[in-house]
Image: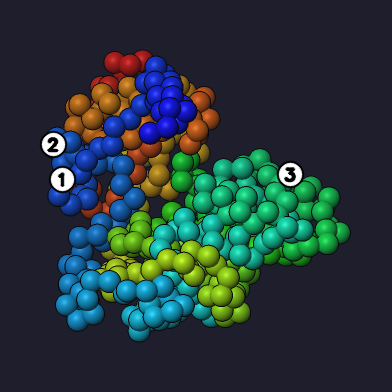
Amino acid sequence: MAAILENFLSQEVATLREKGLFRNLRILEGCQLPKAIFDGKVVVNLSSNNYLGLNTHPKLITAAIRATQELGVGSGAVRTIAGTMQIHMELEETIARFKHVEASVVFQSGFTANAGTVSAILSKGDLIISDELNHASIIDGCRLSRAEIRVFPHKDLNRLEEILRETANFAGRKLVISDGVFSMDGDIAPLPQIVELAERYGAIMMVDDAHASGVLGKHGRGTVDHFSLHGRVDIQVGTLSKALGSLGGYVCGRRNLIDFLYHRARPFLFSTSHPPAVAASCLAAFAVLQEEPIWTERLWENTRFFKSGLQRLGFDTGVSETPITPIIVGKGDLAMRFSDELFAEGVFAQGIGYPTVPEARSRVRTIVTATHSREQLQFALDVLERVGRRLGII
């Protein structure tokens, strides 16, 4: 390795260690379950995005096995050459029907769906107006587009309108973009008001519903359905990797949007398409969402129980409104120590600090799922109380 690179990396890693922010990857043994084995230790898992527990649902497993046996392990090409299989088209048509839109396109991940779409539809001479807490994939897409970027304070509708008013005569295209559910704080965007402002000032409206997919709206259709805004959001992004239990992301909207992304979205153009097993498991997941609403109901029952328990103990859970519930401790090294001591006592809740969140908002982030038992959640609350008091957090 070149000395200049080795010196840089050594210094950066040493700094992380000195600040107490260096983390080793937790290694999962077996399935991603509400009680799982990480680093050889059985723990209650509060760090998974597997909201509905669908990754081990028998219907998804059966669909994946059947597709592999019938269609092979991989697709063998990018979508625009020889890699578009009938099962990919079936999945995109299913998503479009589920979301009540004309069409959809599947990407390799939620990250590439966001970054690829923003950078495809906007370019130099255009304007993006983005919530300051939007996901990193949105931020990267904005930068890649080379459009002018204006950022408004989190959920600050007055500032959003000020920017829209200031740019009312902007010559290029304008895009207003927001997460539906914010991944670090668990709060929900004031989407009706944002949509109304975008309409009033002639801006394109885009929503990233990664953490709302399968969680909010009828059968988990997301924030657009949650707020009854069908037909008023131009671009919806969702994920297949969280509540759907599999892998990938998607964009949906009007037919012209999807046809354009087929031709201009770089991740779609230059990445091999999903293996048949992944597409099949996603198809099965959408069927489960509509046929077995009990999973979403259980998710929210568990969320209410766990969130009320944290608040009763005196933890600072911020502005969370969803199964994502941060426990804010204020210092990065304290968040990491809190996480490590929880793990030692049987609870996996990942510590998160700068640059993912501001140093003063460092936290452990907890996420409950539909498949957690009440006993597991009470055990986690008991451990959180014990460790939280020992560290002076409560």
Determine contact: label 2, label 1, CB under 8 Å: yes
Q: Vertically, is 377 above or below 110?
A: above
Ranked by sequence position, the earlier of labels 3 and 2 is: 2
Which one is in front, 275 or 51?
275
Labelled disc at residue 159: 3
Labelled disc at residue 13: none
Ranked by sequence position, the earlier of labels 1 and 3 is: 1
The image position of residue 340, as x and y in percent, is 27, 26
Q: Give residue 289's quadrant in the image.
A: bottom left
Q: What is the residue that sits farthest to the right in this orientation? A: 169
**Dot 2: few (<14), some (14–19), or many (≥20) neighbours within 10 Å?**
few
Write the residue at 82% across / 54% down: 167
Question: Label 3 sits on what residue type?
Answer: Arg
Which one is in front, 39 or 300?
39
Which residue is labeled 1 in the image?
Answer: 29
User: What SS does tag 2 mark?
Assistant: loop
Which residue is labeled 2 in the image?
Answer: 40
